[in-house]
Amino acid sequence: MHVHDLPLSKMNLGIETLIGNKIGKFYEMDMEESGRSWGATMRIRVAINVTSPLIRALRIRTTMGEELVVSFTYERLQNLCYLCGHLRHISKFCEMRFEDGFQDPGEETPYGPWLQAPMSPWGTNHKSSFANLYFQHRCNSNPV
């Protein structure tokens, strides 16, 4: 999963362990040898409860007392219900549709394709930083 809206100074293993364990069970963080991540998002591996709705955002308090609100995107989403956020069915077959008083939200669903994160091989998150992309571009460009 990818963690968004986290200040660069907070992109470290301690914060990610805290966030991962609030979502489910934290396993690892995609980071450099220094223990930091330098991309637009932090990528962590977390075991989540697939019988509960996906968590879209979370309010956390750091050890220094700072309050942060972070949002999430997920890799490998297959059957995500845009109505209830569960992974075991799609919106067309959601039980909410059969409840009394259900009103179809149309395009204004609480969950949607924006929760799908792009996939990349594990161990490459730090390569997404602007400095590394610029360096790779300069090294790979052909001289005129």
Image (tube, rainbow, N blue to C red):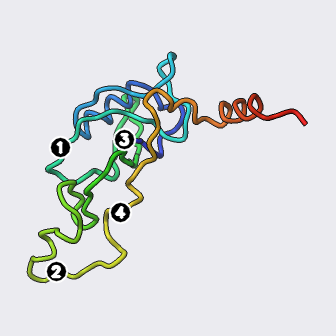
What residue lies at 32% left-to-right and 36% top-to-bottom? 19
Q: Position of residue 12 (x, y in %)?
A: 45, 26
What residue lies at 19% left-to-right and 60% top-to-bottom? 89
Q: Tell me, yes or no, whether the two marked residues, 2 and 1, touch with CB atoms within 8 Å.
A: no
- For disc 2, the marked residue is 102
Q: Tell which circle, 2 or 1, labels the residue nearer the N-terminal end.
A: 1
Query: Please, what is the three-letter code of the amino acid marked with disc 4?
Result: Gly
Q: Position of residue 52 (x, y in %)?
A: 16, 51
Q: Position of residue 44 (x, y in %)?
A: 37, 33
Crowdedness near tag 2: few (<14), some (14–19) or many (≥20) residues, C-alpha within 10 Å: few
Q: Against 105, is 127 above or below?
A: above
Q: Tell which circle, 4 or 1, labels the residue nearer the N-terminal end.
A: 1
Whole-angstrom CA distance, mark 4 to mark 2, is: 19 Å
- For disc 4, the marked residue is 112
> Which is nearer the eye, 71 or 140?
140
- 116 displayed left or right of 22: right
Query: Please, what is the three-letter code of the amino acid marked with disc 2?
Result: Phe
Q: Secondary structure at mark 2?
A: loop
- For disc 3, the marked residue is 1
Q: Against 2, is 27 above or below?
A: above
What residue lies at 44% left-to-right and 42% top-to-bottom? 119
Circle number at residue 49:
1
Residue at the far right in the pictured view: 144
Whole-angstrom CA distance, mark 2 to mark 3, is: 31 Å
Query: Please, what is the three-letter code of the amino acid marked with disc 3?
Result: Met
> Which is nearer the eye, 49 or 79?
79
Query: Please, what is the three-letter code of the amino acid marked with disc 1?
Result: Asn
Q: Tell which circle, 1 or 3, labels the residue nearer the N-terminal end.
A: 3
> Which is nearer the eye, 63 or 84?
84
Whole-angstrom CA distance, mark 2 to mark 1, is: 26 Å
Mark 4 vs mark 2: in front:
4
